[in-house]
Amino acid sequence: MDRAQEYGERSPLPALAARVRTVWIQRTGSQPVVQRHLPTGGVELQCPLGRTPRILGPLTRAKVEHLPPDLTIVGARFWPGAASPLLGVPADELLDQLVPFDEVGSEVPDLAARLAEAPGPDAALQVLQFDLVRRQTRTPPPDALVAEAVRRLMPWQPTGIRRLTDDLSISESQLRRRFLAEVGIGPKTLQRTLRFQGYLALAQAATHGIRVSDLAAEVGYADHAHLSRECLRLTGLTPRELLGGAVDRCGCGHDHAASYGPFLSARPRAALMG
């Protein structure tokens, strides 16, 4: 995240917490901003005020774009597998794509107009969340089996895909098919993405004195070199470049606690006390 902008994350409305990981407001300044979207395993709904909302699909690698100056965006980041029912489109059709919402969703012009009419960014973010709540009441819940699989693929409780399919009484091919429709990527790809998200969450929450090797080991990396290879593959940057000069804590200057707090809440109690 470029320092030359304002970015603030918040917890979603309680009614959305099962689907939405975080909501945010982003403002660019007087200069264009280089934006690096990172793989999170989930879909994002991004709403530039005064422009058409857009969908960022699940990513397998970082997507870089240039945002114009004086732009305000409100958005929502979904948990893996939670957005597809609301959007009415298989998640794999959005893979590595950034597309206008009106190409896949309904009632988008009305949403864009209501966002533009909001008296400020805070009000616009409320409009967006209320719209998602309304959509949620009219759509089926996420696939329960996929949701359970996603929970088990979190880095705090590593499991093999074969063991996962045995526990869920489903074949690997069936699980992959349901993942592609609901999550947009296969279980193994999601597991690697969530492992990296776990490292970022720990780096965001870390205090001085925590070694990067400890952070890497907790989420399942064999060593620092393993972490560096995965970071470069997923983001195009080394851990030090990504985190703003450090490898054991985030130095981007923005508070991501609302995003990583729920992610860290599933961390085993023993690790929290370590």
Image (spheres, rainbow, N blue to C red):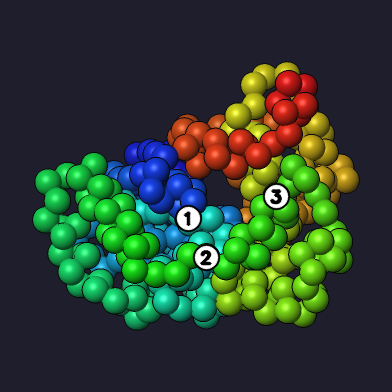
Mark 2 Cα shell of 10 Å, populated few (<14), some (14-19), many (≥20): some
The spot of residue 237 in percent (x, y) is: 65, 51
Q: Residue furthest front?
A: 169
Q: Name the kind of residue labelled 2 in the image.
A: Pro
- How many numbered tags mark residues here? 3
Would residue 89 appear left or right of 130 to someone viewing this image? right
Q: For this view, does 239 lie left or right of residue 220?
A: left
- Secondary structure beneath disc 1? loop
Per the rendering, the mark at residue 245 is none
Up/down of 227 relative to 264, above or below: below
- The span from disc 2 to disc 3 (Cα, nearest Å) is 18 Å
Report the residue at 11% width, 56% height from top.
Answer: 117
The residue located at (86%, 42%) in the rendering is 223
Left or right: 126, with 214 as reference point: left
Instruction: Check if mark 2's residue and mark 1's residue have beta carbons within 8 Å.
Output: yes
Residue 19: mark: 1
Position of the C terminus by quadrant: top right
The residue to which callout 2 is attached is 142
